[in-house]
Image: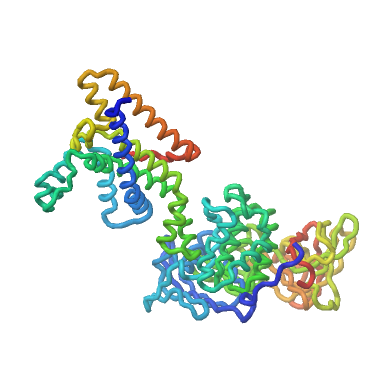
Amino acid sequence: MSPEVLSVILLTLQVATVSTLIVLLPATVLGYVLARYEFFGKNVLSALVGLPLVLPPTAVGFLLLRLFAVDGPLGRETLGFDLNILLTWKGAVIATATMSLPLVARTAKATFEGINPRLELMAHTLGHGRLATFFQYSLPMARRGLLGAVILGFTRAMGEFGATVTIAGNIPGRTQTIASAIFSAQQVGAQARADFFMLVAVVLGFLAILSAELLGHGRALPRMARP
Amino acid sequence: MTSVPPTHDSLQDGSLDGLTVQVRLPLDRFELNIDLHTKKHVTGIFGVSGAGKTSLLETICGVRRQARGIIALGEETWLDSDRGVFVKPSQRHIGYVPQDGLLFPHKDVRHNLLAGRKRGVRRGHPVQQTFETVVHILELGPLLKRAVHTLSGGERQRVALGRALCSGPRLLLLDEPFASLDVALRRKLLPFLRRVRAEFQIPMLFVSHDPLEVQALCDELIVLRDGTIISHGDPRSVLTASDIFPLAEQHGFENILPCYAVEGSGSTGQVRLGEGGDAERAPVELVTLRSEAQPGEALLAGIPAHDIMLATRRPEGLSARNVLPARITQLRSVGHVGLATAELSPDLPPLTVEVTEKSFVELGLRVGSEVFLVIKATSCRLYRTGESRGT
């Protein structure tokens, strides 16, 4: 395996891992809040969270591009310094995180909805406040579903193409991931290279789902979140 | 189960804290409107389903935030909405045992039992000692390492009860803890509740619509209908009151009498009525079906009110094994039936007998009439309490 090919695979794993770590906490909290609380604007929040699932990924990428462009709200001219997002691996992380957050949040929400809220009330009557109940009861009881959510988010991040390519580009050795490498190889007719990355994608995806099934005794993906 | 280790002093000294519950809470069909003051050890809450019993317990726990009014135990006020006092559920020191157990699936039995340990320790409660007592009296030792999904229904409810006790509660709320179990199993769990009652001197509210459980455990009984208390008093009088009696009609009223086993013979068993502690003047014995009870074992005899016949003369040539002289102390009508209260002896709780109103007239029954109660041995149910005579 050439160093260039290896760097594509490593970068893909790096982007997916960092993006999953970033998404994990906010998505879990969002999922919990949406599952447990009633508040003004809940439907709007829920719709916003789900939005990236229904938009064309390129639209999401373009939105991010406008956000981080030199004259955008988070660009150099507004902030006074450069976040250095565009056309870097950090851009790819932001794109994949944006795309996988709704999936993780909605799966987390479905998981928390599957836990009897009276168990949490029971924890309250045994002397645990809200935070302690969340960390010592809600999270551990949801662990299987949350693990499934994380794996879904990770695989989503590994396979993300449209948004990533729009904001981070497709620069070999810098921002090219497996998804964009397959696209490039197919565009220039490099059949063997495309085949190779396709196989890598299949193997990685299969391992991820399989590990979820094994770890969760087949129940790691309880209810697949849908937009 | 022969002896119980001595409990720590903190559970035995002093009298009970008075409980005050004066609350209003709008529910779907009616308003929960409760005014209850009690200093009794175990207060039963009886009523048909949907009468507001669970809502009342949840209000006391503090999980019904809309409730207005006052809830106080002893010196501690948990709710006083006019003064803006609302103590969070986690700070109320209440042990709650729900109908469905609600054991935590991610913890084994031991860690379920200790789920409320931190609060107990904060309050200075001897949690370890209580844990040992609870494991002993509820016979949880063999279960401690089990995962909760492997437990049977009765085991789950025992763990739920133990978990509530281990948190060092000042008040115990039992919401039909055995309602989801079949009758035979419920009867087997009765001794556990009796032991908890004997061991823990904390006020308890016990929701049940089982006349036996209520009489075997409660010092007083309140009856809820459409969110309000319609009756309040000692369990037997409340259950046989004319407005309450029909509520228990599907099971019928069962007389519950403390008794203890004496030597039976052949195919029948024999019990002597009374607690067995004092010297009996004229012991009343009851022939029952053969039971597994050992002589001296404390039992509860249950005799359904509609299984007792009244005779004005001692009947002869009868298969019924029990013909007991008694005196009528009260007569009244409830709907289509007449209820007679008959006293076997001044030392024993009276029996309620259900007969038709016609029989009242034809037998010429009056208060003070001397009668005979005719009871078949097969109508006498025996319930084990897990205790022995005089304890």
Question: Which percent across, then down, holds residue A130?
Answer: 41, 61
Q: Residue at x 30, y 38 (%)?
A: A157
- Pick the residue in front: A96 or B224: A96
A164 over B390 or under it: above or below: above
Question: Which percent across, then down, holds residue A74?
Answer: 15, 49
Q: In the rendered view of the protein, which quadrant contains the C terminus of chain B?
A: bottom right
Left or right of residue A227, residue A136 in this image: right
Left or right of residue A100, residue B46 in this image: right
- Pick the residue in front: A29 or A44: A29
Res A95 quadrant in image: top left
Total marks in image: 0
Q: Is residue B234 visible?
A: yes
- Pick the residue in front: A119 or B69: A119
Outermost residue toward the front in this view: A3
Q: Residue at x 88, y 63 (%)?
A: B263
Res B235 quadrant in image: bottom right
Q: In the rendered view of the protein, which quadrant contains the N terminus of chain B?
A: bottom right
Q: Is residue B322 visible?
A: no
B10 over A174 or under it: above or below: below
Left or right of residue A222, residue B168 in this image: right
Q: Residue at x 9, y 47 (%)?
A: A71
Question: Which percent across, then down, holds residue B31?
Answer: 43, 67
Left or right of residue A83, residue B389 in this image: right
Question: Which percent across, then down, holds residue A120?
Answer: 46, 57
Q: Residue at x 41, y 49 (%)?
A: A112
The image's colour scheme reads rainbow
